[in-house]
Image (tube, rainbow, N blue to C red):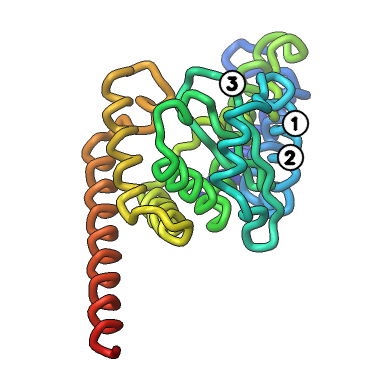
Amino acid sequence: MKRLIIIIAACISMCSCSILGGVAWNPEGLASAAGKAMTAASITDEMVVELCSQAIVQMDAQSTIENGPYAARLARIMKGVDQIDGLPLNYKVYVTKDINAFACGDGSIRVYSGLMDVMDDEELTAILGHELGHVHYKDTKKSIKSAYLASAARDVVASAGSYGALAAYLLGDVGEALVSAQYSQKHEYRADEHGCDFAVTRGMSPYSMYNALNKLNQLAGDNETSVLAHMFADHPKTEKRMEKMEKRAKKYEAREARESRESISSQ
C-alpha cells in the first residue's frame, strides 16, 4: 500500500506541467496532491496528534457544545478517566439529533447528544470504551491517511479547473474521516473487546457492549440515511460483532461464578 501511494504521487508530479487529455492541469494543484499522497505513506503518530488537534478545533467551532445536563452526565460516567496510555483526554458533547461518537488521536472524545438520548449509562460506557480502544490501538492513523488521499484526489480534480476556487481543505477531510471513520473488521472487534472490558472495570454489566451494538444495529435499520446506517451497513458483520460480545460476556459471567464458588469453599 505504501509503495503504491508513492508511485501514484510520483506519477502526479510527472504530470504537473503537462497538458493531458486536452486539459491544462494546474501545477500547483497537482504538486499539492502529490505531496499529500506522499505524506499519507509516511504519516507519523506525532503528525496524527497534531492534525487531530487542529481538526477538532475546527469541528468544535462549527458545532453547538452542550455544557448542561448532557455534559454533567458524561463527566459522571467518565469520572476518573482523564488519560489513556499517558495521553490526556478531553470530552465534549455536540448538540445534534445524530447518533454518533468519535475519538481523536489527540485524546479528544466527542459525543453526540442524540447518542446519549438513546443509550443508558452502561451502553454509553461501553461505546466510550470502544472509542478509547481506537485511541489505545492508534486506529485513527488509518483514517488520517484516508483523509490525506481523499484531499489529494480532490486536488487532482481541482487542478483541471480553478484550483483556488475548488481545492479542498485538508482539515475538513480529516474531520470527516474522524466523524465517519470506517475501520477494518479486525480493528472493530478489538475496539469492541476494549469497550466490553472497559465497562466491566467500571462496574457495568459484561453485556453492556453487546446491548449497545444491538441497539445501534436496530437504530441503523430504522434510519437508512443516518451516520449509523453508514457505519453498520454490513449487517452480517455487525451480527458477528454482537455474537463475539455475547460470548465474551458469558465468559465474564462464568469466571465470576467460578470465583464466587472458590470464595465460598475457602471460607
Identify residue for label 2.
53
| Residue name at image x 66 percent, y 56 percent | 83
Q: Nearer the viewer, residue 157 or 240?
A: 240
| Residue name at image x 50 percent, y 36 percent | 181
Identify residue for label 3.
95
Query: Crowding near pointer 1: few (<14 within 10 Å), some, many (20+)?
Result: few
The quadrant of the picture occupied by the C terminus is bottom left
* Residue 80 drawn above or below residue 229: below
Query: Crowding near pointer 2: few (<14 within 10 Å), some, many (20+)?
Result: some
Q: Please, what secondary structure does the residue beneath circle 2 have?
A: helix
- Mark identifier at residue 57: 1
Left or right of 36, for residue 122: left
**Label 1, label 3: how far apart the Cα atoms are:** 16 Å
* Residue 152 drawn above or below residue 103: above
Q: Please, what secondary structure does the residue beneath circle 1 have?
A: helix
Residue 171: x %, y % from top left: 70, 29
Q: Amino acid at mark 3?
A: Val
Query: Crowding near pointer 3: few (<14 within 10 Å), some, many (20+)?
Result: some
Q: Please say if the residues under marks 1 and 2 sit with CB atoms less than 8 Å apart.
A: yes
Left or right of 197, for residue 10: right
User: Which one is earlier in the sequence, the residue at label 3 or at label 2?
Assistant: 2
Q: Please say if the residues under marks 1 and 3 sit with CB atoms less than 8 Å apart.
A: no
User: Which one is earlier in the sequence, the residue at label 1 or at label 3?
Assistant: 1
Q: Please say if the residues under marks 3 and 2 sit with CB atoms less than 8 Å apart.
A: no
* Residue 74 drawn above or below residue 196: above
| Residue name at image x 29 percent, y 53 percent | 245
Q: Please, what secondary structure does the residue beneath circle 3 have?
A: loop
Q: Amino acid at mark 1?
A: Val
Seen from this angle, which residue lies furthest front? Answer: 267
Left or right of 243, for residue 126: right
Q: Quadrant of residue 244?
A: bottom left
